[in-house]
Image: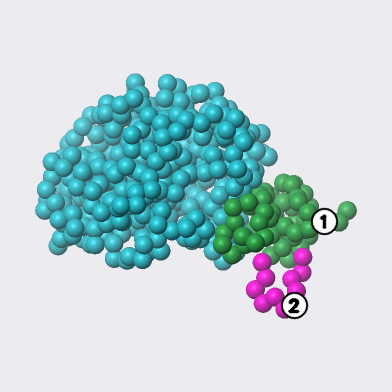
Amino acid sequence: MSPGTVYTETTVYSAPEAWVIEAPYQIAIIELDSGGRVTARIRGGAVATGDRVEFIEPAATDSNPVPSFKKASE
Amino acid sequence: MRSVAVAGIGKTPFGALTAENIRSLAVTASRKALSDAGIEPGQVEAFYLGNFAGPSFVGQNHLAPYIAAETGITGVPCTRFEAACASSGAAFFHAWSAVASGIYDTVLVTGVEKMTSQTTPRVAEILAGAGDTAGEMRAGATFPALFAMIATRHMYEFGTTREHLAAVAVKNHANGALNPDAHLRKRITIEQALAGKPVSTPLTVYDCSLVSDGAAAVVLTSKPGAVRVAGIAQTSDHVALDRKATITTFPAVRAAGEKACRMAGVTPQDIDFAEIHDCFTIAEIIALEDLGFVPKGQGGPFTAAGHTALNGRLPVNTSGGLKSKGHPVGATGVAQICDLVLQMRGQAGERQVERHRRGLAQNLGGSGATCVVTILEAA
């Protein structure tokens, strides 16, 4: 997925059953440079609306990865 | 098109009603509405049921005839409508259209949900089914998280604050404290609301509606009555937030509000009071804007200034709203209609408002994929 900009975000404290162990965690809607938006998990530090983010390539062993992004390196 | 009247209303209290099951709740509300209308079950020509997730919450399908027969209604079309939290709004819209078009003269519309027999994580999981389960929900979203992202963006674009959100909760709790049928009859302070436990930032527990059991019912007839449906519309949009062009306005709400006003021949400024779908505090703020009561971005300041309080210029959620009255999701749309009618009859007790000739109800499904707006007028 292309890099993008954080359109909006939230940190989830009250998580659904499947993710309780990871809470609190941040999710965001990313506006992709290539067009369109995607709802994704943020990893490696918090982001704010308007921040630039880059896609984290999933591990080859992950057959059904959750799309994840991190703050873009300067 | 014929004029349609709301001839009878009936509700159960909302709350954690452990002694009741989904059918007993729905039958109680249905019988109350029929008796209020002075109609026998045998006169009902069709039964419209709004229910979001009975099969998941209580493991029962085929709910419409299951409930109707126990109410004394058999032999006629009985159908369940599902549109997330707008399930009974959708049932009401289709019931109205059948009476307005002349197919039936007398129909019963009931909404019900039995939610509290499940654990909180399981309730969250079932509610998440009203979103895009393969997209946003898989990324770790919950319904509070979706509306939290809407709030974050609304704050970013318009400068809406945590205090604005808290003002919605404080006002709705104050109203609900006066409603004997409300789930949480408790006043709260701005300080309490601001210090609430975080659910999904920036939303705290005080920004989120309740998980409740309850049912509500109305009888619609083609006979002229004291309260008539002056305008109504049901609209739709994408389910997933990330498919929408903007998330700080809901096109489905705007369109439903405009259509309903046009049909009633009124503007938003002609509405005396409203029941608005405050599943989350930010939803009430955005609905005030999308329905044309205030300019875009002004929903928060309008609320904080007290204009939506019981004695304000536009009383909103005099019932306590979903926040305090409770939110048995499938019952909410019809419950809003019942609350409008109570005000219009002057039967709202301590929360009675002065101007109550024309009321508007807005029922939202999911994060804006279904909307039903109804305008009722006293004869």
Q: For mark 1, does the 10 Å Cα neighbourhood hold few (<14), some (14 to 19), or many (20 or more) residues? A: some
Q: Position of residue B330 (x, y in %)?
A: 37, 52
Q: Residue at position x 52%, y 44% from top?
A: B208
Q: Main secondary structure of the magenta part?
A: loop
For the C terminus of chain B, which image quadrant?
top left
The dot on residue B109 is none
Cα gap from disc 2 to disc 1, whole angstroms: 22 Å
Q: Which residue position is annotated with label 2?
A: A60
Of residues B277 and B200, the one nearer the viewer is B200
* Mark positioned earlier in the residue sequence (2 or 1): 2
Question: As shown in the figure, which amino acid type bears the numbered disc 1?
Answer: Ala
Please provide the residue range marked out in magenta. Answer: A56-66
Q: Chain of mark 2?
A: A
Q: Position of residue B137 (x, y in %)?
A: 57, 61
Q: For mark 2, does the 10 Å Cα neighbourhood hold few (<14), some (14 to 19), or many (20 or more) residues? A: few
Q: Position of residue B378 (x, y in %)?
A: 26, 30
Q: Residue at position x 61%, y 60% from top?
A: A20
Find chain A in the image and tell me its colour: green
Q: Residue B1, can we see it?
A: no
The dot on residue A72 is 1
Find chain B in the image and tell me its colour: cyan
Q: Residue A65: say if magenta.
A: yes
Q: Residue at position x 30%, y 56% from top?
A: B21
For the N terminus of chain B, which image quadrant?
top left
Q: Residue B282, can we see it?
A: yes
Image position of B20 (left or right of B245): left
Residue lying at the far right of the rendered structure: A74
Q: Position of residue B199 (x, y in %)?
A: 59, 47
